[in-house]
Amino acid sequence: MNWKKLWKAHPPKNLNKQMKSYLKWETPVEAEASSDKLLEMFNNYLDEDDFLKADMAKRHLHLGFARAEPYGRNVGARQGSSDVEQDWDALEKARGGRIFYKKWKEATTNPKYIKLRKKAVYKT
């Protein structure tokens, strides 16, 4: 897929800053609030048929998950014992990442998003 062709116009930089301000996954409470806000923005952009901004919101949901993922994978290594089972729920940051993951999955399976994406990708 050629993303340069897909995005001929760049979204405003202040929108990116606004979305980044909601990337908080340190505790499950922060993660729930910030992922809810990003998902709300995602749905609002879909209602406006603005694929580019909706996709940016979806990417920020994924970013919240991806930044918290290493905390879940390296639980045993950080405690100094390789016998510790590496479990997502072992750390609060990992739990926050799981919350972002669920919201990201919800966004990627949204039928309207899939329809807009197909329309944008196959547009000639």
Image (cartoon, grey):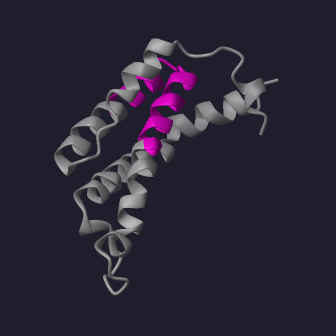
In the rendered image, the quadrant that contains the N terminus is top right
Of residues 62 and 36, the one nearer the viewer is 62
**Magenta region:** 40-63
Question: Does residue 3 appear left or right of residue 95 in this picture?
Answer: right
Q: Residue at x 31, y 82 (%)?
A: 84
The location of residue 49, given as percent across then percent down, is: 52, 20
Image vertical order of residue 97 relative to residue 89, above or below: above
Q: Is residue 30 magenta?
A: no
- For residue 15, what is the image quadrant? top left
Question: Does residue 79 appear left or right of residue 30 in this picture?
Answer: right
Q: Residue at x 42, y 40 (%)?
A: 61
Q: Residue at x 78, y 25 (%)?
A: 5
The location of residue 33, given as percent across then percent down, is: 22, 37
Q: Residue at x 27, y 36 (%)?
A: 34
Q: Is residue 47 magenta?
A: yes
In the rendered image, the quadrant that contains the C terminus is top right
Question: Does residue 26 appear left or right of residue 86 in this picture?
Answer: left
Return the residue found at the far left.
29
Image vertical order of residue 81 relative to residue 24, above or below: below
Question: Does residue 79 appear left or right of residue 121 in this picture?
Answer: left
Return the residue found at the far bottom.
83
- Magenta residues: mostly which secondary structure? helix
How many marks are shown on the rendered structure?
Answer: 0
The location of residue 100, given as percent across then percent down, is: 35, 48
Of residues 20 and 119, the one nearer the viewer is 20
Image vertical order of residue 55 relative to residue 110, above or below: above
